[in-house]
Amino acid sequence: MYFLQNIYHKQVGDYIKVYLYIIFLSKYGKDVKLNDLSKKLALPLKTIQEALKYWEDAEVIIKKSTGYIVNNLQEIELHKLYKPKLSSKVDVEKSSQNQYRAKAIEDINSSFFQGVMSPSWYNDIDLWFKKYGFDEQVMIALFRYCFERSALHRNYLRCSS
């Protein structure tokens, strides 16, 4: 159990006892009282407090005014594994740039290759975007220029760029 990685071995058993007893109490709708836990589990009050603090920090239990709420461990794990990625402003800008670039490549494919552009062209176009820092409109203009001169082949484009 990953929750128990940072505690000493002698405390593991005590912390698990506290957790299991809290689950038992929550199942029957009873409130958790520190003194009662200490007596029932034969553990010092300080150990009970440390265990409760540990489980709160691990977000396994939530303290409320009259006791504790036990979180669903399966749900916690699922949220950790399948947490949606939130994009940063940079990621959003890159994504919109990539979409704009993909649209430009699609326009080049449909306008100058009648929709059957060779896959190797995609790598070349992407390389030219990166290497020369061309804007999408510049890349389309470059292809238009070559197309109008019936010179739409890589060697001519490499020399033109």
Image (spheres, rainbow, N blue to C red):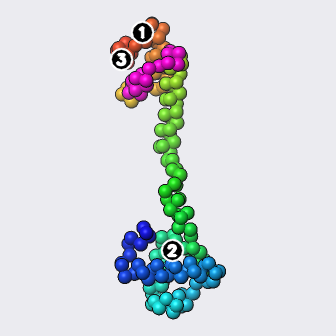
Reading the chain from its start, which is encountered first: label 3 or label 1? 1
Is residue 12 or residue 95 the one in the foreground? 12
Rounded to the nearest whole Å, what is the CA distance between mark 2 and mark 3? 62 Å
Q: Which residue is mark 1?
A: 151
Rounded to the nearest whole Å, what is the CA distance between mark 3 and mark 1? 11 Å
Q: Which residue is found at the position 48% from the left and 70% from the top?
A: 58
Magenta segment: does it hold 98? Answer: no
Image position of 155 (left or right of 116): left
Q: Amino acid at mark 1?
A: Ala
Q: Characterize the local packing of mark 3: few (<14), some (14-19) or many (20 or more) Cα atoms within 10 angstroms.
A: few
The quarter of the image holding the N terminus is bottom left
Reading the chain from its start, which is encountered first: label 2 or label 3? 2
The quarter of the image holding the C terminus is top left
Q: Which residue is mark 3?
A: 158
Q: Amino acid at mark 2?
A: Glu
Residue 105 coordinates in the image, percent (x, y): 49, 24
Whether residue 15 can be seen here: yes
Rounded to the nearest whole Å, what is the CA distance between mark 2 and mark 1? 69 Å
Q: Which residue is found at the position 54% from the left and 73% from the top?
A: 61
Q: Are marks 2 and 3 in contact (CB under 8 Å)?
A: no
Q: Which residue is found at the position 52% from the left and 33% from the top?
A: 99
Q: Which residue is mark 2?
A: 56
Q: Label 1: state its secondary structure.
A: loop
Q: Amino acid at mark 3?
A: Arg
Residue 90 coordinates in the image, percent (x, y): 47, 43
Q: Characterize the local packing of mark 2: few (<14), some (14-19) or many (20 or more) Cα atoms within 10 angstroms.
A: some
Residue 3 coordinates in the image, percent (x, y): 44, 70
Q: Which residue is found at the position 52% from the left and 71% from the top?
A: 60
Q: Is residue 143 above or below residue 13?
A: above
Residue 69 coordinates in the image, percent (x, y): 59, 75
